[in-house]
Amino acid sequence: MLSESDLIKIRRHLHQIPELALQETKTHQFLLETVKAMNQKFLEIRNPDELPTSMMVLVHGFDPQRTIGYRTDIDALPVEEQTGLPYSSQHPGVMHACGHDIHMTVALGVLSYFSEHQPKDNLLFFFQPAEESESGGKQSYELGLFHGRWRPDEFYGLHDNPDLPAGAIGCRMGTLFAGTTEVNIDLTGKGGHAAYPQDANDTIVAAAMLISQVQTIISRSIDPIQSGVITLGKIDGGTIRNVIAGHTRIEGTIRGLTQKMIETIDQRLKDICEGIGRSYNMTVNLELNQGGYWPVENNPELTKRFISYMKSTPNVNFIETAPAMTGEDFGFLLAKFPGTMFWLGVDDDSQLHSATLKPKEEAIQHGVDAITGFLEYRMTE
């Protein structure tokens, strides 16, 4: 079984070899070697051809009533590390700036424990590529990775949180992460001379009206008790001050705490774009791309059990948390399988996706102990 010092060495090695979505070849190889070094008596390893950098490990239980899934993400971000750590990223321009090296290490620690202590139920460990982009969770589901004995009855996963004390477990009933939708809007009218607006069809004026109307969606179409966000962060139109722009592009993002809320916002945005097109006699093309970044909506029954266990366990520092507007593709899997996502505190002044993120490594063993304990408890029910 991996010791705390073993886990820290593993984490530091993973931190040095960060790789972007669907390019996690060195990471996959290291994970495979680490798992193969464990006791293989209860383990079955699968490397799906459909998603080559993914890995699935099934721990066969001695009296399985269910299969409990545990997912960890393995990719990194296109960020140039600025921590100054002796084990900093060896890959220029790529960094584990979201703490996926912590996630993987905790998963390996839990897997190591159950490789030596056969569980009652089957346990499925899923090492998932492409969380930061490319919708790895959605891809894994749509490629058919979860079938037969590889299908979990319930799914769990964590995300590190620099705002919580190192080793603390955070969770909540309901939504933990918001769902996200990318927004692209192209307005196409007719360009012309600034002195002759009557002979042109100004897309910048139409875009300004569209942006103003979009601001009413959250304030007038969403329950004020709920939370949603629309940010139109980029607008590109025109070439010079005295030419009326015949094309303008707007780019932005939508965030919502439930899939229903996101669908409501999407529909209202479609209505506004259609209305602007008619009002200004131009083409308004709206592209909405949610991909696999659905809201992370925790299953009520399973999450109640999870929180109850964490609250009642003396060595666990449990903290009830608010929902976050950041996205996480585990939400897609939780829409297909009941389960729970939770936080692991890593206590750092820097935020996730920051070039200076330095999670506290003492969180790793706390995470392993809390998750191992919960899984053993879950298998007694």
Image: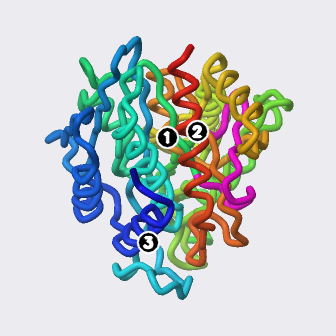
Type of the residue with mark 3:
Arg
Where residue 300 sits in the image (x, y, percent)? 66, 19
**In the image, which residues are magenta?**
160-178
Query: Decide: marks 2, 1 in contact (CB < 8 A)?
Result: yes
- Name the residue carrying label 1: 293
Residue 368 in the figure: left or right of residue 76: right
- Image coordinates of residue 200 in percent, x first then y, are 54, 58
Which is nearer the eye, 96 or 283?
96
**Proximity of marks 2 and 3: CB atoms separated by less than 8 Å:** no
Residue at mark 3: 12
- The residue drawn where x is 51% and y is 33% is 156
Q: Secondary structure at mark 2?
A: strand
**Please, is residue 219 above or below residue 192 in the view?**
above
Question: How far apart in space, not on screen, are marks 2 and 3 (Cα)?
Answer: 31 Å
Amino acid found under the numbered disc labelled 1 = Tyr
Q: Rounded to the nearest whole Å, what is the CA distance between mark 2 and mark 1?
A: 5 Å
Q: CA distance from mark 1 to mark 3?
A: 29 Å
For the residue labelled by badge 3, is the local secondary structure a helix, a strand or a loop? helix
Q: Residues within 10 Å of mark 1 (few under 14, many from 20)?
A: many
Marks 2, 3: nearer the viewer: 3
Q: Residue at x 29, y 61 (%)?
A: 27
Outermost residue, right side:
224
User: On the picture, is 264 further left or further right than 49?
Assistant: right
Residue at the spot of label 2: 179
